[in-house]
Each structure stands twice: as structure tokens, then as C-alpha cells.
Amino acid sequence: MAITRNMDPKKCPMPVQDPMERRNNFDEVALGYTYEMAVNEAKRCLNCKNKPCRSACPVQIDIPAFIERVANEDMEGAYKIISQSSSLPAVCGRVCPQEKQCESKCVRGIKGESVGIGRLERFVADWHREHCTEKPEMPVSNGHKVAIIGAGPSGLTAAGDLAKLGYKVTVYEALHLAGGVLVYGIPEFRLPKMIVQKEIDNLKAIGVDIETNMVIGKVLTIDELFEMGNEAVYIGSGAGLPRFMNIPGESLKGVYSANEYLTRINLMKAYKEGSKTPIKHSKKVAVVGGGNVAMDAARSAKRMGAETVYIVYRRGMEELPARKEEVEHAEEEGIIFKTLTNPVEVLGDDSGEVCGMKCVEMELGEPDASGRRRPVVKEGSEFVLDVDTMIMAIGTSPNPLIRSTTPGLETNSRGCIVTDGDNGLTTREGVYAGGDAVTGAATVILAMGAGKAAAKAIDEYIKGKK
């Protein structure tokens, strides 16, 4: 059917909760497109034949094809196209940095704003969840078994792709709930846990088994997984070991890693009245770091009742690595950005509680190895920030448990598993790895892309053994 294209240079705005209301609750900030909004936005797509947007998608969704279905009001058809490539569309539609990937290649972005690809993916996934009662078709078994370590985005993607090919897949998750960073790291107001659980239920419906409370390296080793009849193992265990600055005072009460702080809130529901998980109800909070995790921690602290919340970042606003949307939402909610600032000491009172943070002002010098201008200390700029809580959000690295219990598994100086190219093959035959366990902390969609590539390589490896 011929479509009348919408040539509006701007994308349809996303409806959101009012900032002054949402900073007091953990309900989802973005409310999602209506049916009419989605169809209208889809008509902005020119349905390019060379599909530049698809080339920038780590899981290679046929973006113009699914958007064309939305424009034609075939929402279930759109979902089927997305689900051919993505096992977690409702998740990706919410947390994937589309502005740096698919949307950055959109032709409409040359003379205006790109098509709202992520917003349309979210709409389609939500529409399917709310309207479709059909159960997924169970794949025909091929008689082979594969083990997956970690039920985060990388492991779940690999599990879904392998299950669709007929493999008997068992996912081993260390925590008591599947989802990895999707459940312990990303707050409810960005990614409702009901959405994550539904995506996991879809994987279970096609035969994926998930065993929780299974710490690989303690309960079972990788060698034992092979002894259980698995022909390949995929390590998607993430990077959950927090980094600190190693400055004086980091052991004081009131200093958290962002991982711990967010896990207490997201996974253990410390924000709910009557929660048994202890967490400090702070008045003045400093979050050190400038990425999405820092934004999540700061915005969560505000919702936990903090009167003042600072983002302390050693570079400027232009260098913030967090998504633009997350920065804007944080500013709207009253988060104060102390950029070109670096902590040098955490100060404590007589009871061992945080009572301040000694900082220095920074200025940007010559570019460093990453290409960003290196921050250098401004002489004589020392000052004290009045805070009672400090949250460190400066990155994470892989937990050493798996590498320390798996002979022959090579890791680099940062503790990340070494793999051969894009297929995820490690230095152990039949053992593959991907996501944050290989790259260090990165995005959900890149972890999913790694899981997808490894699933393809595992399939080829097992077929090659016949």
C-alpha cells in the first residue's frame, strides 16, 4: 500500500511524566507513543533501499522493514521482523543508545531529526505484549546442549538465538533473578522490571532453562558444565566488580559503589516502604562519574529523598558520556552538575560517617589516548563539597571468579576475557565469551550483539564437529 510520507523535520516528541512529579516516584519516566503517534512517526521513514540505519545496529534489525509495517498499521508484522534479530525488543527500545547507532545513520537526520527508531521499537514491543495471546512456537530439537553463564542481555540473547536453532540451552545465573544489569542496575523509572520479566518469559516459552543462584566457579566449574554433556559454553557474566578511586576516606560509612547502591534499590526494592534491605536515606549526595550509571544513581538518590544531589565529573558537560536524554532528564529533575571537578578525599566525622568531600577544580588540556582532552588540576582550587553520601560510578570490571577457576582461559591486564575476533572464541576450545566480560562495562545493545555473534559461531562449531 502506498504511504503518504510525513516530511516533518522533527520527530514526534515522547510523552513523559512531569519532572517535579516523577522525581518523587519510581514509575517509568517515558510514557510511550500512542498508536497514532507511532503511525505518524513511522511515516517519516523514507524506507531507504540501502538501509544505512541497519548497518549501525549491533543486532542487525531490518529497521526500514519493521517501520514500514508500523506505517501500514501492521503492528504484529513489525514485531515479527524485529524478533527475528532481537530477543529483547522492549528492553532495547528503552535503553539502547539509538542516537549513537541506528538513528545516527538515518537519512532524515541530515536536514532535520532522525526517525525515532528506538521509540518505534518500544511501541511495537509493548503493543505485542498487550495484544498478542499467541504462544511462541517451540523449535524442533537438534539434540545438542549448550550452557550459558549469566542471564544478562548478552547471555539471554545467545540463549534465545541458540534455542531458536533447536539447542537445549541452560542459563546459569548467580543472582536470584534473571536479567543481569537489566534488573540490578537500570532503575525502574527507565526500565520497568515487568518488561524484563516478560522478555525472559518469552525465552522460557521457546525452551530456554534458567537456573538462578548458580555461581559458576563455586557451585559448578566450566569443566563440570562440559562433563554434564554441554558441547559449548558461552560466558556472558558481565562486569560487576566496581572500581574505586583509591583516595583517602573511601572506607567511610556512606560511601557506595553505584553497583551496590543501584542493586539495593532495583533488585532488592529498598525504595519500597517496609523493605528489609538497608540503605542510607541521604540528604546531600555526590555521585562521581558522568556515564549512564552515574545518571541512574543520581536520579535514584533524588527519588530516595535526597534534598541535594550532585554529579561530580572531571571533564565538562560536552564530554559527558551519558546519553543526552538521560542528562536532560537529570537536569529537569534538579540534579546539580559539578563538572570540571574531581574528588581527592572523602571526609568523615567522629562516628566514621561521610561529612564532606574534598575536591579540586579541573581544566582541560591536550587530548589523551581516548581522543578526549585530558583533565588537569587547576592550582589552588581545592574546596569542600558538603555531602553525607558518596556514590562511585567510575566503571566496573569483570569478576575474577570464572577466570581463576578455568585453566587455559586467557584474560588481559584489565581482567577481561580474551577472544578471537568477533565470534567470541576464547583460548579454551568450545568456550565462547562476549559482552562486558570481554569489553568491560559497555552498553546493553553491544552486549546483545556479542551474544548474537557468539551464538552463530557456536552453531557453526558444533555442526563442524559432526
Image: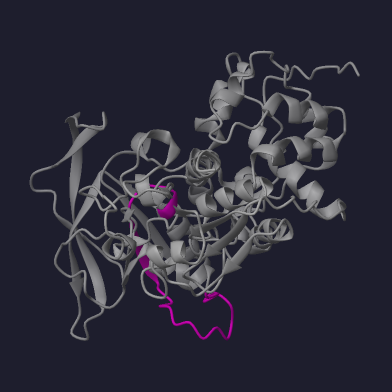
| Quadrant including the C terminus | top right
Q: Is residue 14 visible?
A: no
Give the answer, above or below, for where 416 lies relative to 50.
below
Residue 75 versus residue 421: which sits nearer the camera? 421
Is 271 one of the magenta-colored residues?
yes
Write the residue at 72% across / 16% down: 46
Is 390 one of the magenta-colored residues?
no
- Can you give x and y, in whole percent of width and height, for residue 450 in the image? 48, 42
Residue 407 versus residue 358: which sits nearer the camera? 407
* Boundaries of the magenta span: 268-293
Left or right for 424, reference 98:
left
Q: Residue furthest front?
A: 466
Left or right for 133, reference 342:
right
Q: Residue furthest right?
A: 1
- Can you give x and y, in whole percent of width and height, for residue 125 in the image? 74, 46
Write the residue at 30% across / 65% down: 405
